[in-house]
Amino acid sequence: MAGQQPPPWVHAAFLFCLLSLSGAIEIPMDLSQPPTITKQSVKDHIVDPRDNILIECEAKGNPAPSFHWTRNSRFFNIAKDPRVSMRRRSGTLVIDFRSGGRPEEYEGEYQCFARNKFGTALSNRIRLQVSKSPLWPKENLDPVVVQEGAPLTLQCNPPPGLPSPVIFWMSSSMEPITQDKRVSQGHNGDLYFSNVMLQDMQTDYSCNARFHFTHTIQQKNPFNLKVLTNHPYNDSSLRNHPDMYSARGVAERTPSFMYPQGTASSQMVLRGMDLLLECIASGVPTPDIAWYKKGGDLPSDKAKFENFNKALRITNVSEEDSGEYFCLASNKMGSIRHTISVRVKAAPYWLDEPKNLILAPGEDGRLVCRANGNPKPTVQWMVNGEPLQSAPPNPNREVAGDTIIFRDTQISSRAVYQCNTSNEHGYLLANAFVSVLDVPPRMLSARNQLIRVILYNRTRLDCPFFGSPIPTLRWFKNGQGSNLDGGNYHVYENGSLEIKMIRKEDQGIYTCVATNILGKAENQVRLEVKDPTRIYRMPEDQVAKRGTTVQLECRVKHDPSLKLTVSWLKDDEPLYIGNRMKKEEDSLTIFGVAERDQGSYTCVASTELDQDLAKAYLTVLGRPDRPRDLELTDLAERSVRLTWIPGDDNNSPITDYVVQFEEDQFQPGVWHDHSKFPGSVNSAVLRLSPYVNYQFRVIAINEVGSSHPSLPSERYRTSGAPPESNPSDVKGEGTRKNNMEITWTPMNATSAFGPNLRYIVKWRRRETRETWNNATVWGSRYVVGQTPVYVPYEIRVQAENDFGKGPEPDTVIGYSGEDYPRAAPTDVKIRVLNSTAISLQWNRVYSDTVQGQLREYRAYYWRESSLLKGLWVSQKRQQAGFPGDRLRGVVSRLFPYSNYKLEMVVVNGRGDGPRSETKEFTTPEGVPSAPRRFRVRQPNLETINLEWDHPEHPNGILTGYTLKYVAFNGTKVGKQIVENFSPNQTKFTVQRADPVSRYRFSLSARTQVGSGEAVTEESPAPPKEAYTNNQADIATQGWFIGLMCAIALLVLILLIVCFIKRSRGGKYPVREKKDVPLGPEDPKEEDGSFDYSDEDNKPLQGSQTSLDGTIKQQESDDSLVDYGEGGEGQFNEDGSFIGQYTVKKDKEETEGNESSEATSPVNAIYSLA
């Protein structure tokens, strides 16, 4: 039934009963109506013999219909068969076999009849068949003898089953048979060999049939092959030979068809089914198959190739797919083709299916039954299950081929008509009733429904109704105006109102009114318009490396009255949010991205009414997959071609391939790099060494990393040869004074070139005519004994294997072992260069006394004592070496003002020789090291105490200390001051010029030579109060002086007024200065201020003005400066105040007054009392 369905986002709770826009109107079930079949079994009904049989037939009608059945076109009396029953209120048959019986006895053609007083409806003719899975007949199969290269067909011939079984081939050990373009299974189940090879004999071949209903697999006895060949050995290397067939002595043949036979065949297929064309060819080499259609192209949207191009499948065949197809089989020997003529037939299919006809008395109508097919189907009309020809005549009815016309119908015209259209390929059966009713309009849906729709969408308001005659329906909005039709509105035949584009002004109440000659009925629908859901920031395609973090954004706008749900799909399936993912309101984060995370991600923002989608693709760059299917070809004595199939590059192009090899003689199981190739190749010629049993593997590399190694190739052993090189890094060195050890780096497997690799070692003394001594060694060292001390030898090491000797080796000079030197340096002279260094000079020893290779002359020296009395020194021996045959050197880093002793020796590879005569020398006075533990302390804001210890190394007699210091405040730096102290002084006190500046001190010790290294320290930062109260004295500021003058003038005026008032007898309350505090609490305890020792000098409580005229902060940041310039107060060790402050300056300024408070202009008011 054609018609527009409502948008998928419409919520089910707000939908009307949905009717097709052009379909027939349904009769409400409370009204009288003929039967209608609503459910029935398929036409070809195959059942499992192990289950009860169920044949479905259900119908509706008023009154409820009764049911009966026919079997093979004869009445089926259910009451007479105890196994057969009919379900209550249904025509469904149940055949029960629990108490026995054979299901095959009930096979046949069944038809259901549903009847009430207004007519009879019929089901399709249902053909009941019982599934069959017969056993394979027992047979003994002789071995199949075939010549190598010949074609072969192994026939399956499965037992006929219902439905047909699924065929597959396996070995008797249940291993699947590997199929390719040479060996494959045909559609008929047979196994075809385009040409037989010797390796086909390694397994047997058994045909298996799997039956659908019984879920059983039956296996045929296996075939065994015996392949006759001209090359009896199945050498694995020949499989990879570029011309495998000729290498095995198999004659090449042009293709010929194994199925179908001949050059032409035909095939018929029904419309709507799948067309399967098959061509299997033999030949050597194995032919390739290609498909063509005569006079046109293959339908690309429906055609696909199967079974290694041996089959062509075209789905959903139509008449235009008929014609001639041909397959072309070709190899290098030639080609042949087979033509298949395809005819498309068709079982009947509907062009115009008859619909139920509802008429009022006196109305006209018609039933139409049109179908097509190939051949053209015939049409037969029936009424209530009987041929129309045998039905009672009806003057109001006229049959015109595929149409029945009704005129001036009456109540007596009610019946069910059947249209049966058929041809040789099938049939169609349709029921359509004629109902004559006289019914006023009625609404079939609930009243006052609410429909919510999305702005700018197309929507439809349905108004299900019924009446006879069929009522006319009109729509109104908000209870006023004319009928809605035209423009943005369209009313369909069934009464549905379509609004083509919803706008905000379309919101309101819609009324549908149905009217016929018997009356009218109406219903209302309330329409609400909602804003659409939109993703305004969509996820973007991303490329990420494995292990990184990816975030996909999805930000949404939606109608606030609707509930929003945001979900994610991966590859169009719901995404499982695991522990590596985090879903937030507007994003999806993936941590530690892996290869399996690659794919399309769809953000789905949905409400009850609509949804919006946004898709992005995540590409994960991963390490490449391992290469596979390694193949060795072009086998030669010193080379081989290695070919491989690249693995997936996982979105990062392969840049290189590394070929590795392993040999099983010298280092089995150890892989070595052989060569490296660009990522664009998959085949390379490898250079090989003789007598190596090679096995290769390949590693792919891209920007992300390396793949796992491929599986190893088969082994390939090269033939042997004499070595072409000799061992490297040949050396001769003595390990004792009377031997020489000859060593070399042994040759590896790729340079051995043959079995039983050994080394011929030769040696003789240099510059003599001695004959060569020799020895054969299997290791990598040889020791020559009883040699003179340190004499040169000529050495040769030559490789040899069972195939012969290597090339003549190079001669290497080695030396026998060394002995300790016999002589010491003589005439050692010392010259003092400065306080820390001396120069040495000596006479060389004779070369024959060295008894080895002269490494160096070495001086041993130690500090005997310091020239300073009572100073402990370390007498640990130290050394200085002078490599080579030298006659002078310098010893540095000595301690000044010290006594030293020195000895010299000759050193060779064995060790030290005898010591020379001991020499003594004294270093002069030098500058001292830095004073130790320099400490800077600040006990108060007036002084800084410095302390230090004597230098660790005076390096002479101390003459005193030099102190340099400078004051600085930020970027301002004061003048540097220099103080000199005696050598015994280790303390000094600096008087601060101001409480805020910091000081930088530099202290050094002195000897007669000069000042030594200085140590630098800085004084600590002063307290915060010092900064606060060190600001410029505001009493000297012009604005403050002006303010004080104004206040003084104001006070003077106030005094004059007071005197005038007093002279007139007025009394004013005057506050005594010590009676009551100004506030309920003393703020001094809270703000950190201190009590004065002189109570008369206390300021007014709450006053911010100090006695010296400066402004004090209310915060608790008082300091010593707040209360005077000096005093005898005491401090703790940490600098805190523990005494009472004195206010010398305040007392001087207020001396002669009765109270110091008079210095404050405000206090002056109170002093008048």
Image (cartoon, grey):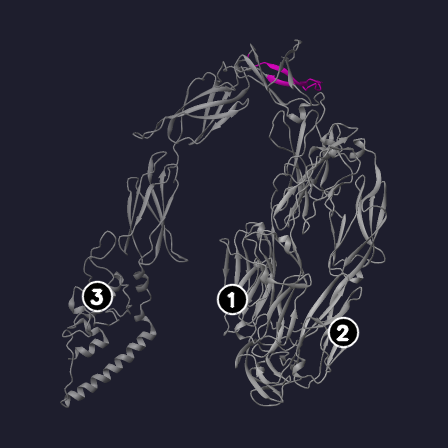
Q: Please name the residue that numbered disc 2 is placed on.
A: 402
Q: Amino acid at mark 3?
A: Glu
Residue carrying label 3:
1085
Q: Nearer the viewer, residue 1085 or 118?
A: 118
Q: Is residue 517 above or below residue 814?
A: below
Q: Nearer the viewer, mark 3 or mark 2?
A: 2
Region rendered in magenta? 789-814
Quadrant that contains the N terminus: bottom right
Q: Is residue 229 visible?
A: yes
User: N-terminal of the two: label 1 or label 3?
Assistant: 1
Which of 544/202 is in front?
A: 202
Tell me the crowding category of disc 3: few under 14, some 14 to 19, or many 20 or more residues within 10 angstroms, Cα based.
Answer: few
- Whether residue 408 sits left or right of residue 7 in the image: it is right
| Image quarter of residue 358 | bottom right
Disc 1 secondary structure class: strand
Q: Residues within 10 Å of mark 1 (few under 14, many from 20)?
A: few
Residue 1120 figure quarter: bottom left
Q: Nearer the viewer, residue 190 or 395?
A: 395
**Residue plotted at (19% across, 62% down):** 1142
- Residue 14 at x, y = what percent? 53, 75
Is residue 1056 left or right of 728 when viewed as pictured?
left
Q: Is residue 246 left or right of residue 946?
A: right
Q: Is residue 624 visible?
A: no
SS class of the residue under badge 3? helix
Question: Where does the image place residue 178, in percent across and percent down from the top left?
Answer: 69, 40
- How far apart are the two marked residues, 1 and 2, measured between alpha carbons? 54 Å
Query: Picture coordinates of residue 891 (x, y %)?
Result: 46, 28
* Marks 1 and 3 in Cβ contact (< 8 Å): no
